[in-house]
Image (spheres, helix red, strand yellow):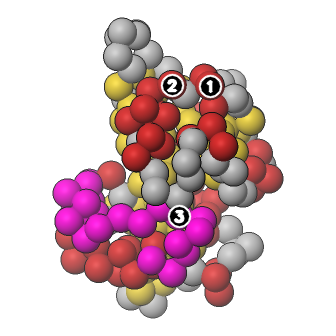
Amino acid sequence: MGEVQRAVFKDAKEIYELIKRYPVEVLPRSISDLVTHIDRFFIYRQSKKVIGCVSFKVLPEMGKETEHIVEIVSLCVSKRYHKAGVGSLLTRAVIAHVRQFHPTRIILLTFSPKFFKKLGFRKISKRKLTNKIYLGCIHCTKYTNPLECPEVAMELKKPEPTELQDI
């Protein structure tokens, strides 16, 4: 049985290869970007092999210094392990980690809204993610307009105190 772990530098190449296998679902990341942000990655390792990963970004809100948004990014699981709970374990691990920073919002963009709904996320308008659009989506080479991107914007609902114990 595998386990969720914090990524280390030697995991960057396996993370890169995993993300590269899903060019439609996950935005590509360079090796240098992965190494630079390795401290933000969680991996699921089974039999000494990385079969899943997830990371997070901090999105500063200009002009809204009381807003602290964290975006969950790069969730990726080897096809063989889809529906085995690996994605849920990784997502819960990254949520538990970022909660220590007391973000005002935890968001993501996804092609799999049903999966994230089961984890407590709800759909929101991309128009509520102005800074995300201008810092990240505006540079996307896949779509001409960030608001036309088919990914669904979602936000984690505010959990009750008892829900926090489960994560």
Whether 91 is drawn above or below 19: the answer is above
- Which disc, if any, is residue 130? 2
Residue type at tag 3: Val
Residue topped by disc 1: 127
Q: Which of marks 3 and 2 is nearer the N terminus?
A: 3
Residues under labels 3 and 2: Cα distance? 21 Å
Q: Assign a secondary structure to mark 2.
A: helix
Is the C-beta separation of discs 3 and 1 under 8 Å? no
Which one is in front in this view, the residue at disc 3 or the one at disc 2?
A: 2
- Residue 47 position by quadrant: bottom left
Residue type at tag 2: Thr
Whether 116 is drawn above or below 7: the answer is above
Q: Give the range drawn in magenta.
A: 20-39
- Which disc, if any, is residue 26? 3
Is the C-beta separation of discs 1 and 2 under 8 Å? yes
Residue type at tag 1: Arg
